[in-house]
Amino acid sequence: MEKITSFILPAVTAGIIIFGFAKGIKVFDCFAAGVKKGLSSAIGLLPPLMGLVLGVTMLRQSGALEVITNMLRPLAQISGIPVDVLPLAVLSPISGSGSLTMFEQILKNFGPDSFEGRVASIIMGSTETTFYAVTVYYGSVGIKKTGITVPAALLADMTCFVVSAMSAGLFNS
């Protein structure tokens, strides 16, 4: 199986090139135009992505994450979300790498089979980095007004946080 998978990408690439030549398409010119468009998209995305990375770093380093977590404590207790999972819940809509770091800390501190570990695992498998996705997808096509996208996505994330605690509670041993 390993040998088959190592030939898939070269076979698909060769197939595309052969198909292009058969149709009379200038394959290299199309490739170069695609690369140029991709690079301009990447350059256009750099400022918002850098702002997002800077914001996450400031959130963590300034202690604001702790302040936000402390403010959300009563809400977490009502909804059943473990207080120790709150930093993950706060970071997961913002930063994939930041939430992965929090997730690893939760697993290290409580273990993967703990209630906290199960809730964190469900959150990691069920949520999206909302602000990153909006930045990349909307930014790549030049949309500046996101409308109801962000509030709806954040509501979906909050629903996931509560349902993850409820789901993990079903199997609490």
Image (cartoon, rainbow, N blue to C red):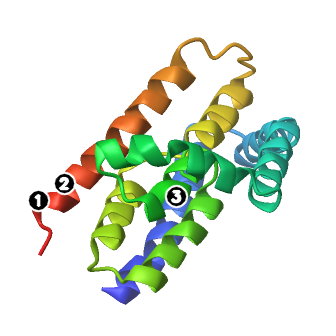
Does 167 appear above or below 48? below
- Figure quadrant of the N terminus: bottom left
Disc number for residue 88: 3
Q: Residue at x 85, y 47 (%)?
A: 50
Inter-mark Cα distance, 1 to 3: 21 Å
Q: Which residue is mark 2?
A: 167
Q: Residue at x 49, y 55 (%)?
A: 86
Label 3: few (<14), some or many (≥20) within 10 Å?
many
For residue 170, the mark is: 1
Of the pair 155 and 30, the residue shown nearer to us = 155
Q: Residue 26, located in which quarter of the rendered image?
A: top right
Look at the numbered discs 1 and 3 and tell me whether their residues touch, using CB distance below 8 Å. Answer: no
x, y (%) of residue 5? 40, 78
The vertical placement of 142 against 31, above or below, is above
Nearest to the observer: residue 70 or residue 46: 70
SS of the residue under disc 3: helix
Asked if disc 1 and disc 2 are in contact, CB closer than 8 Å, the reply is yes
